[in-house]
C-alpha cells in the first residue's frame, strides 16, 4: 500500500547506488566520444541524461586532462560531486571518497572491454535516434485474457558484442557490499533481467537475449573482488515465466491492496537481503496494534524509475 515508517535517516544505499549509476552512464558517454569516436552521439546522450548545463561543466573539466585514466578519474570526481550525494557522519562506507575510488577501480577493470563491447546506437549517423545508455521504458504488458499491466524501468546500457558478430547485449550495473558466489548465482534466474530484456526488445525492435551484469563495490577491498562481470542468457521460455510472475504478483497486489490483514504471509522473505525486514514489528503486532501503526506511517518515496517516468 506504499506506506512506510517515518525515517529520520537517509536511504543511503539507494542514494549512493543512484549516484554511482550516474557515473556508469557518464563513462558510457565518455566511451561514445573517446573510444567509438561518436562525439555528436556523446553530446546527445550527455545532454539527455545529465542536462545540458551540467554535462557541459563536467565535460569541460574532462577535456583538460590527457590520458584515458586521467579523464575517467576527473569524470568520476565531477559526476559524483555534482550528483547531489553528500556524506553521512554515521556511514563510513558510503562516502564520496570511497565512491570515487570504487568508480576508478570499476573504470580500470572494465576499460579493457570497451573496444569489444561498443555502445549500441539505433543510427550511427543520426545522434537524435535512440542510444543505448540509460534508456527509460514505460510499457504496457497485454495478456491473452485482456489484462493490461504497466511495467517501468531503466536499461543501464545496450551493447554490441564484437566477438559474437555484434550480438546485442544488455548491460546491467549493480552496486553491492559483497560480490560472492551467492550474489553471482542470483542473476541466473532473476526476473528483473528477463523483464528488462523483453521490454528493450519490444521498445527498440531488436533481438536481445544476452546480458552482462556489472557488479561494483562502493568501498573497494583491493582483494581482487571489487568488480565482477557476469554473463547471463535468457530465452522465450524465461520471458513466459517472467510474464506469468508479473501477472500473479499484480493479481495478489490488487486482491489485497486495501486489505493487508487477509493477505498471505510470505515469512521466508522476513530475512532477505542479509537483514531483517523493517516491517517485522508491524506484521508481528496485533490487529489493533497494526491499525495504530498504520495511522503513523507515511507514503514511500518514488523509486528513480518512477521519478523518471513521472517527470
Image (tube, grey):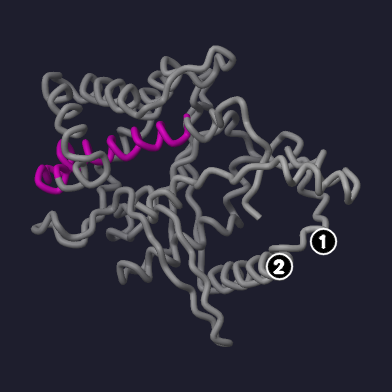
Kindly indicate whether the residue at mark 1 contacts the one at mark 2 (C-beta within 8 angstroms): yes
Give percent across and percent down for residue 193: 51, 56
Find residue 135 and report its image quarter: bottom left
> What type of secondary structure mainly makes up the magenta span?
helix
Task: Report which residue position mark 2 lands on.
Answer: 252
Front residue of 51 and 247 = 51
Q: Is residue 29 above or below residue 261?
A: above
Circle 1: is it few (<14), some (14-19), or many (20+) Cα within 10 Å? Answer: few
Q: Tell me the distance, in whole angstroms, between the alpha carbons under discs 2 and 1.
A: 9 Å
Q: Would residue 60 be counted in the magenta stretch?
A: no
Front residue of 184 and 22 = 22
Q: Is residue 38 above or below residue 7?
A: below
Q: Is residue 36 above or below residue 74?
A: below
| Image side of residue 144 versus residue 111, left or right | right
Image point (80%, 62%), residue name: 263
Find residue 89 and report its image quarter: top right
Q: Residue lying at the far right in this picture: please name it.
A: 286
The local secondary structure at tag 1 comes to: loop
The local secondary structure at tag 2 comes to: helix
Q: Residue lying at the far bottom in this picture: please name it.
A: 145
Q: Would residue 19 be counted in the magenta stretch?
A: yes
Q: Read off the magenta span.
A: 16-43
Front residue of 184 and 269 = 269
Image point (40%, 32%), residue name: 19
Give percent across and percent down for residue 300: 58, 45
Give percent across and percent down for residue 292: 80, 43
| Image side of residue 54 versus residue 306, left or right | left
| Image side of residue 248 versus residue 78, left or right | right
Give percent across and percent down for residue 108: 34, 26
Task: Report which residue position mark 1 lands on.
Answer: 264
Amino acid at each position: 500500500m506504499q506506506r512506510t515508517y517515518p525515517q529520520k535517516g537517509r536511504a543511503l544505499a539507494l542514494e549512493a547506488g543512484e549516484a554511482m549509476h550516474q557515473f556508469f552512464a557518464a563513462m558510457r558517454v565518455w566511451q561514445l566520444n573517446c573510444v567509438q569516436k561518436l562525439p555528436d552521439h556523446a553530446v546527445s546522450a550527455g545532454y539527455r541524461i545529465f542536462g545540458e548545463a551540467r554535462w557541459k561543466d563536467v565535460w569541460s573539466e574532462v577535456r583538460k586532462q590527457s590520458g584515458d585514466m586521467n579523464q575517467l578519474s576527473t569524470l568520476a570526481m565531477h559526476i559524483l560531486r555534482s550528483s547531489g550525494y553528500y556524506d553521512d557522519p554515521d556511514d563510513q562506507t558510503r562516502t564520496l571518497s570511497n565512491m570515487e575510488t570504487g568508480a576508478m577501480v570499476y573504470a580500470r577493470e572494465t576499460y579493457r572491454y570497451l573496444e569489444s563491447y561498443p555502445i549500441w546506437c539505433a543510427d550511427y549517423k543520426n545522434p537524435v535516434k535512440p542510444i543505448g545508455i540509460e534508456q527509460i521504458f514505460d510499457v504496457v504488458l497485454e495478456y491473452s485474457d485482456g489484462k493490461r499491466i504497466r511495467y517501468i524501468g531503466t536499461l543501464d546500457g545496450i551493447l554490441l558484442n564484437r566477438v559474437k558478430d555484434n550480438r546485442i547485449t544488455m548491460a546491467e550495473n549493480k552496486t553491492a557490499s559483497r560480490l560472492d558466489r551467492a550474489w553471482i548465482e542470483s542473476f541466473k534466474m532473476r526476473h528483473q533481467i528477463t523483464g528488462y530484456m523483453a521490454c528493450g526488445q519490444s521498445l527498440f525492435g531488436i533481438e536481445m537475449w544476452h546480458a552482462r551484469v556489472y557488479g561494483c563495490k562502493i568501498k573497494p577491498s583491493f582483494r581482487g573482488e571489487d568488480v565482477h562481470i557476469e554473463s547471463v542468457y535468457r530465452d522465450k521460455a524465461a520471458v513466459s515465466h517472467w510474464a506469468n510472475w508479473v501477472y500473479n504478483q499484480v493479481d495478489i497486489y490488487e486482491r489485497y491492496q486495501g486489505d493487508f490483514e487477509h493477505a498471505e504471509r510470505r515469512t521466508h522473505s522476513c530475512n532477505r537481503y542479509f537483514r531483517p525486514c523493517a516491517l517485522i514489528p508491524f506484521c508481528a503486532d496485533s490487529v489493533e496494534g497494526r491499525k495504530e501503526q498504520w495511522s503513523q506511517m507515511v507514503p514511500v518515496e518514488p523509486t528513480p524509475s518512477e521519478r523518471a517516468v513521472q517527470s
